[in-house]
Amino acid sequence: MKRRRWMGPAAFAAAGAVLLLFLILGRGEQAVILSYSDFWLLAETGQVESVTLTDGEYWSSTLTDGTAIRTPNPRAVDGKERLLALDIAVKEQESALPAWALGLIALGAFILFSQSKGKGALGLKKYAAVQADEQAPEISFQDVAASGETLQSLKDLAAFLKEPKRFSAYGARAPKGVLLYGPPGTGKTLLAKALAGEAKAPFFAMSGADFVQVYVGVGASRVRELFRKARKAGGGVIFIDEIDAIGKKRDSGNDEREQTLNALLTEMSGFSESDGIIVLAATNRLDTLDPALLREGRFDRRIEVGLPDHDQRLKILEVHARKKPLHGDISLESWAGQTALFSGAQLEALLNEAAIRAARRGSGPILEADLESAFCGVTVGEEAPRRMTEAEKRVTAWHEAGHALITHCMLPDARLTRVTVIPSSRGAAGYSMSVQPDKLLHTRRDLIAMICAALGGRAAEELLLGRDNVTTGAANDLKKAREIAAAMAKDYAMGETGDPDKDENAILIQAMDSARACLKDHRDALERLAHALLTKETLRENDLKEILSQ
């Protein structure tokens, strides 16, 4: 190791010495300096044998009697042509140094770079160092909101770390690996930190992508380094986020990823309960992981971290609202009800966006209007008013009124909160917003009603304009309807024939017929909604209740 440490600087020093020697020797035989006019006088009288043109300060020339002379470089465009016309040998040299000297210097620089780049010298690193917080994170289970089952599983792990003897007395062993899986933004990383904080244990966190390097073997060495640091610290929580980056099912297509995965498997098999190490990993795609990772003795405990329910959303909002000046009229209970299917990250983004809007306004606390504006920005994009013709605005009003009316009629448990004909930054000409109730199971009738609501805009356009004049505004609605119908036919076996394609089409036709019939039966209400949208552009929950109650 010591030898490698001085090889680079030594090579660089040698190259410098050679360069200095060359310069000294080159100056040992002083050349005669002639003016430019005197040089041409000798050239035109046939006394110049050869000239070396450079981009430096002087030309170098040799006279017929062997005398070396130097001439100030005039940098004239026609200089070379004049010399050739006089039958003088002309050489061109871009640098005053010979090629062998330049090559030696380049070799020394390459050796120096090769020896030092792994250590971060010259401002470069082959790969980042393993990051680890020797101190336990300053958060606990009180700072997170998760389901009772998830928290209980993590509390068991914390107890294993704090009181291992209590469990070993019963012959129980701590799980070596715990896999947290679920949708993005549900707080898997936060839960891992909370576990370490609750157990007062060091926290070693890396992403699976950090192990994937260009150089074969680097990822495996980083795995070994990570576990070595955990052992040196006396145990702790190792957390690998996005483990699917290295833990996908092996297909012999990536040697570096497979070596890294093998190193991880070896390390997990190699440490014992006495090491006090628990490995947590997070993924959004449990089905893509290699079976060797999921067997007993590896990641043998799996904890699902799903989207929060109403009570968890309320707690998450309360946690993130602690340092935000909310107006007293704001009800976090109400907002917890309006944010069904929001992840923890989306709830945090909602309050952050509201705070940004309040700060932009520059006075007073965060208002309900700030939250409403932020909610629309997070879900459908910012309002981006664009010039619409009266015909386009009328079609949009009927389209959105169709969505709202069918939602009201066919999904009575859903809350209509906002309908607008103001375009959004994500390309929508308008949108209807409703909050679905938290439900674990949906009936076939529920799913058909959802498809009807999605197709309500197209059905309203047909009622207003006829089938030959419907617009492209229903593209996203049709996509959503097809996705639900496909799931019904393929995943839930809710078709009639058993042929997925035929059943999917039959479901869509049935839903479209139901949507058309609903709008025809309630055309008066449809027209009232469309007229109100043309007048006010945006209808909120109270406006919608008043119109639809008639």
Image (tube, rainbow, N blue to C red):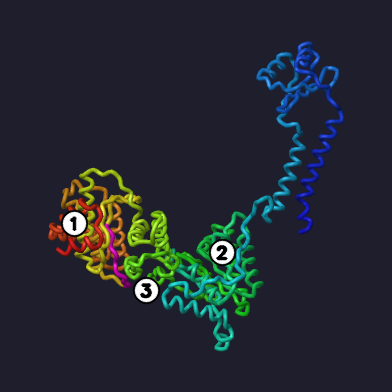
Number of residues whose C-alpha sits closer than 10 Å to that of mark 2, classed few (under 14), some (14–19) or many (20 or more): some
Q: Earlier in the sequence, mark 2 or mark 3?
A: 2
Between residues 54 and 288, which one lies in front from this camera angle?
54
Front-most of 475 and 286? Answer: 475
Identify residue for label 3. Answer: 311
Label 3 neighbourhood size at 10 Å, few (<14), some (14-19), many (20+)?
A: some
User: Is residue 137 among the parts visible in the rendering?
Assistant: yes
Q: Which residue is mark 2?
A: 206
| 152 sits to left or right of 498 | right
What amino acid type is highlighted by mark number 3?
A: Asp
Q: Give how far across and how far down residue 500 sits, in percent.
A: 29, 62
Task: Write down the region rendered in magenta.
Answer: 432-440
What label does residue 282 carry, if any? none
Q: Tag count in the figure?
A: 3
Name the residue type under label 1.
Answer: Leu
Asked if 474 appears above or below 450 in the picture, the reply is above
- Left or right: 543 as drawn, with respect to 10: left
